[in-house]
Amino acid sequence: MPLRTLALASILALAAAPAGVLAQPQPPGRIGFVNTERILRDATPAVRAQKKIEAEFQKRDQELAKVADQLKRMQDELEKNAVTMSETQRRNKEREFGDLNRDFQRRQREFREDLNQRRNEELAQVVEQANRVIRQIAEQEKYDIILQDAVWANPRIDITDKVIKALEGGKPPAK
């Protein structure tokens, strides 16, 4: 059978088919939404991770605060006594202040970089754990798609509370 005849026969067969056979409506898909920001703020593993990071960086933070106080005192002393100091004393104090300030800035920058890196490591573990829970909920409750971080989502499709509850060790509530 030539290709043109086959195509024409296919079109005629489709046209003759009952409308219900061709256009069977699909049931609407089940959609869910998860607010990742809330999970990273409220879920027990996220809160635990934040406390762990705070404890880990507390000593360095306190050391930086001491150096900042020392710099403030040095600056106040320089401003107060600059007129009564000799030129050499003033230059030495200014150099000492500048050296300490540069060291402080460097340590502060390293602190922020280290803190951000550790926070990202810890939160990545929480996100990974949350994604496993989300997949479990999606499979158990037959979701077609679960979105994260939408601009807006109807609260009736928000399953964030289920995810947080599951992360805290409880079973997610039934549909």
Image: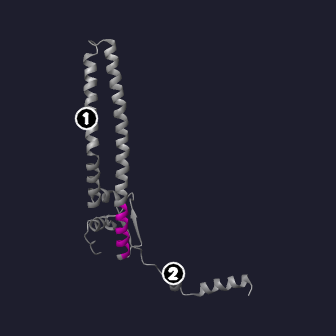
Mark 1 and mark 2 residues within 8 Å of each other at the beta carbon = no
Could you tell me how far apart the alpha carbons at marks 1 and 2 are, in whole angstroms?
A: 74 Å
For the point 26% across and 68% down, the residue is: 169
**Which colour scheme appears in the figure?**
one colour
| Residue topped by disc 2 | 23
> In the picture shown, does residue 60 fall above or below 144?
above
Q: Main secondary structure of the magenta part?
A: helix
Q: Quadrant of residue 107?
A: top left
Q: Which mark is residue 66?
A: 1
Determine the image quadrant of residue 122. Answer: bottom left
- Give the residue type at disc 2: Ala
Image vertical order of residue 92 relative to residue 35, above or below = above
Q: Position of residue 52 (x, y in %)?
A: 27, 53
Closer-to-camera residue (167/88): 88
Amino acid tagged 1: Lys
Say if the magenta span includes residue 43: no
Instruction: Say what secondary structure mark 2 lies in.
Output: loop
Q: Nearer the viewer, mark 1 or mark 2?
A: 1
Q: How many marks?
A: 2
Q: Residues within 10 Å of mark 1 (few under 14, many from 20)?
A: few
Whether residue 69 appears in this view of the structure is yes
Q: Is residue 79 above or below residue 16?
A: above
Q: Earlier in the sequence, mark 1 or mark 2?
A: 2
Q: Quadrant of the C terminus?
A: bottom left
Q: Position of residue 69 (x, y in %)?
A: 25, 31
Query: Magenta residues?
Result: 127-139
Residue 142 located left or right of residue 52: right
Along the line of sight, which residue is nearer the eye, 142 or 154?
A: 142
Secondary structure, mark 1, is helix
Give 132 or 146, whichever is nearer the viewer.
132
Q: Nearer the viewer, residue 126 or 4?
A: 126
Residue 1 position in % (x across, y down): 73, 88
